[in-house]
Image (cartoon, helix red, strand yellow):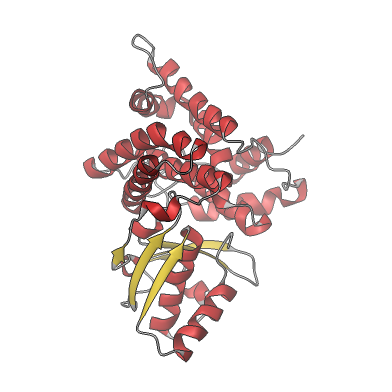
């Protein structure tokens, strides 16, 4: 399941009702867990009209008992109050954010990750990195979310490529699972940002895998933010151990961004989107703008023309 749809949820809640179920287990990657969250909403509210729940605090009703069992290390959905759903008819991809979506329990078993293919290890791991970085840069941080982001980034830089290179490395898998959880807790309070807004629009339009989308977009956005984020990126560069003593703040920030590009290259993530078409740029930018503003407390606000310009940078020339 690349992106959970309202049609997926309708099918799942039909089974839930037919079998007289008492609870829901979300087993799989972030899309499966988000689908399970959507199923819980449909069961609790007795409706599959999901457009009424998009945005913040629209559910307002306790879901059936819900257990999240992640089999990837990246989305952090097991630790968040959010679900991202794609409308099967309109192709719009949107977030539903409500405290009622926090799982009652999360089972973090690294053995479930041992068979994860390399490309999914890369995509999900870079998704976790993006969560941590965007949460850290945002303007709604707390002392706790900063600490969670920092811990996640340190774990990712120490363990992501190890997990990619040797999928049977149980310690690396354990640490990546912890990183995903910490990053999820960070962004469920401090939010994500323009990277995710752009990625969600791409995912809805072209069904691009979400982790791959944010992996590719992240360094472009960080470069666009410029001096506004150099201080924070320099600190993250120190945590990631990609800087040297004596480097200026600007150089440290640049080294951190470059290290993200290097991770993408080493894990064959890609640098552009062949799916992108000129005729889609305006609608993509409109969707990204609607999602980002005013919800995400980003360090640099983007206009619709800014989003168009960023999408153009991501096109294959």
Residue at 65% x, 72% y is 89
Quadrant location of residue 283? bottom right
Q: Position of residue 126 (x, y in %)?
A: 49, 41
**Pick the front one: 147 or 2:** 2
Q: Can I make out residue 47 in this image?
A: no
Residue at 71% x, 39% y is 315
Q: Position of residue 35 (x, y in %)?
A: 49, 69
Q: Is residue 40 left or right of residue 288?
A: left
Name above or below for residue 64 compared with residue 116: below
Q: Residue furthest front?
A: 168
Name above or below for residue 195 compared with residue 50: above
Q: Position of residue 228 (x, y in %)?
A: 42, 28
Quadrant location of residue 64? bottom left
Q: Residue furthest top?
A: 246
Residue at 58% x, 63% y is 1
Q: Position of residue 48 (x, y in %)?
A: 51, 80
């Amino acid at each position: 399941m690349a992106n959970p749809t309202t049609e997926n949820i309708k099918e799942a809640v039909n089974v839930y009702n037919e079998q007289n179920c008492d609870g829901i287990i979300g087993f799989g990657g972030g899309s499966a867990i988000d689908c399970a969250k959507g199923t819980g909403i449909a069961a609790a509210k007795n409706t599959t009209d999901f457009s009424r729940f998009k945005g913040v605090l629209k559910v307002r009703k306790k879901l059936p008992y819900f257990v999240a069992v992640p089999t990837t290390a990246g989305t952090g959905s097991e630790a968040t109050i959010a679900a991202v759903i794609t409308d099967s008819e309109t192709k719009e991809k949107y977030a539903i954010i409500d405290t009622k979506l926090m799982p009652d329990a999360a089972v973090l078993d690294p053995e479930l990750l041992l068979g994860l293919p390399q490309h999914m290890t890369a995509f999900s791991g870079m998704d976790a990195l993006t969560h941590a970085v965007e949460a850290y840069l945002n303007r709604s941080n707390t002392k706790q979310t900063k600490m969670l982001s920092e811990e996640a980034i340190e774990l990712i830089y120490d363990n992501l490529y190890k997990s990619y290179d040797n999928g049977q490395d149980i310690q690396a898998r354990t640490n990546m699972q912890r990183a995903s959880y910490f990053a999820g807790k960070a962004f469920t309070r401090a939010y994500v940002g323009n990277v995710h807004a752009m990625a969600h629009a791409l995912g809805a339009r072209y069904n691009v895998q979400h982790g791959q989308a944010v992996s590719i977009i992240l360094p472009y956005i960080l470069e666009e933010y410029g001096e506004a984020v150099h201080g924070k990126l320099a600190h993250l560069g120190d945590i990631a151990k990609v800087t040297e003593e004596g480097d200026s703040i600007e150089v440290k920030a640049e080294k951190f961004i470059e290290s993200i590009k290097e991770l993408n290259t080493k894990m064959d993530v890609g640098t552009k989107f062949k799916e992108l078409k000129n005729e889609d740029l305006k609608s993509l930018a409109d969707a990204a703008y609607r999602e980002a503003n005013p919800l995400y407390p980003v360090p640099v606000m983007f206009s619709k023309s800014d989003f168009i310009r960023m999408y153009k940078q991501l096109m294959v020339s």
